[in-house]
Image (cartoon, rainbow, N blue to C red):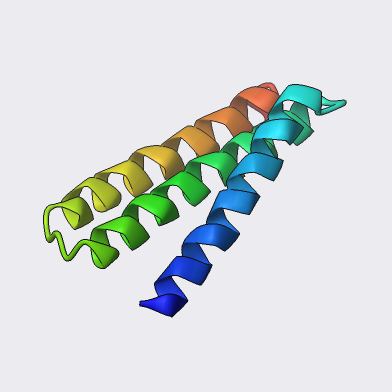
Amino acid sequence: MIVIDIAVAGLAVAFLVAAWRVVAGPTPADRVVAADLLTFSLIGLVALVGTRLARAGTFDLVIVATLVAFLAAVSLARALTGGHR
């Protein structure tokens, strides 16, 4: 359980750094990448807390949130490039 606690602390630090970059990012691309990191670090936190508490229901939430976050990242990248491939 110590490893899970260390991983939670590391993801919490990544979450805070990403939140700071979303606020202070100099370009929209920096903000999009930081928002993506923010989302996936939050999903990681949920997965680790679910593992720590031995709750099986959190993994359904993690799967759905990961799919939504991936689609959001793709759509943000597409919007950032103006729809060009």
The quarter in which the C terminus is drawn is top right
Question: What residue sits 52% from the left and 30% below the top?
Answer: 75
- Nearer to the camera, 85 or 12: 12
- Nearer to the camera, 27 or 15: 15
Farthest-out residue, front: 2
41 sits to left or right of 79: left
Q: Is residue 22 among what the camera can see? A: yes
Q: Quarter-wise, where is residue 24 in the image?
A: top right
Q: Where is residue 29 in the image (x, y as percent from the top left)?
A: 76, 32
Q: Quarter-wise, where is residue 11 in the image?
A: bottom right
48 sits to left or right of 22: left
Q: In this view, does 32 lie above or below 57?
A: above
Question: What residue sits 42% from the left and 53% below the top?
Answer: 45
- Nearer to the camera, 9 or 62: 9
Question: What residue sits 21% from the left and 57% below the top?
Answer: 59
Q: Position of residue 15 (x, y in %)?
A: 59, 44
- Nearer to the camera, 16 or 25: 16
Farthest-out residue, right: 26
Q: Is residue 85 among what the camera can see? A: no
The quarter in which the N terminus is drawn is bottom left
Q: Is residue 30 above or below residue 70?
A: above
Question: What residue sits 51% from the left and 50% below the top?
Answer: 41
Q: Where is residue 19 in the image (x, y as percent from the top left)?
A: 65, 34
